[in-house]
Image: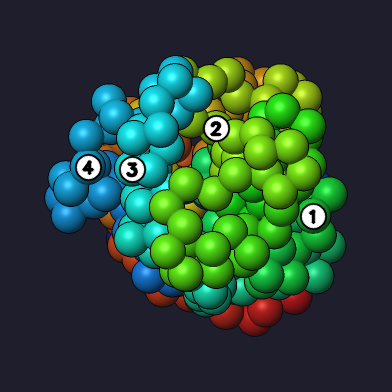
Amino acid sequence: MVNSNHKAEIEAAEMILRSRKLVVFTGAGISTESGIPDFRGRDGIWTKFDPDDFTIQKFLESEEARRKQWKLLLDGGLLSNIKPNKAHLAIAELEDMGKLDCIITQNIDNLHQKAGNSADRIFELHGNMQWARCLNCDRRYPMEYIREKLQNGVDIPECETCHGILKPDVVFFGEMLPSEVLDAATEHAMHCDLFMVVGSSLVVYPAALMPEYARETGARLIIINIGETPYDSRADICIEGKAGDILSGIMEKVREKL
């Protein structure tokens, strides 16, 4: 396993250039560099809110729970007009170069799409915060519309068509991951030859099984993260640091070798 960042970036660039099917797996650590707060970090959202208050069961059963969840989304910055950072742009460049098979992401912020990656190459395991959905009639609303409602004093938005419960189109605690997305992501992980983790501690399951699937079928593994992960000892390369800095360094070396 390579530890020197400079040497590791060179080797990572060489792996990318040799790969035929590169899968990039992203977690909260890539989004924090765009100003989105981490949920589990030292100053994360769950230090200010009790995660037990944010289950799908409570959301469905309690108006107060719905009020708390919408407040969390508004106050936590998840409804802000955030922009992709240089890590997202580096991954978009990989697609432009023809080196990217797909992105599997735990994030719900739509930043890969904003950076320029094709929507059909992005598997969002936990959904996408760009939309809210009525649980009764299935009408969808742009989240920008919901954000305006919340900012104008509506604390629990409801469907204008049927007055049903509106829910962010993301996976809550107690909900299953969308099976079609999970199955497709698993298939890509099992058929890649290089799997690159960016900004994930790899402790949230079943998403954290993705590098396992890749390794079991012979793929090389690169991990870029601040802090250790359970897969570090099995990785070909581990680079500790900010995703934007590391990926920018790797992409500079990829361009040099093209």
Which numbered disc, 3 or 4, marks the residue closer to the eye? 3
Closer to the N terminus: mark 3 or mark 1? 3
Residue type, mark 3 in image: Lys
Which residue type carries mark 1? Ala
* In the image: residue 27, left or right of residue 225: right
Name the residue rendered at 67%, 30% in the picture: 135
Secondary structure state at the residue bearing disc 4: loop
Residue of label 2 = 171
The residue indicated by pointer 4 is: 49
Label 2 – label 1 distance at C-alpha? 19 Å
Is residue 124 visible in the rendered image? The answer is no
Mark 3 touching mark 1, by CB under 8 A? no
Q: Nearer the viewer, mark 3 or mark 1?
A: 3
Q: What residue is pinned by disc 1?
A: 119
Callouts 3 and 4 close, C-beta under 8 Å: yes
The label number, if any, that marks residue 68 in the structure image: 3
Between 206 and 157, which is closer to the camera in this rendering? 157
Question: From the viewer's perspective, is residue 21 above or below residue 74?
Answer: above
Q: Which residue is drawn at the image coordinates 42% and 37% (left, top)?
A: 66
Task: Please say if the residues under marks 2 and 1 sit with CB atoms less than 8 Å apart.
Answer: no
Lateral position of residue 89 relative to residue 154, left or right: right
Earlier sequence position, callout 2 versus callout 1 = 1
* Residue 94, horizontal then vertical, whole percent: 71, 65
Q: Secondary structure at mark 1?
A: helix
Q: For residue 33, what is the image quadrant?
A: bottom left
The amino acid type of the residue labelled 4 equals Phe
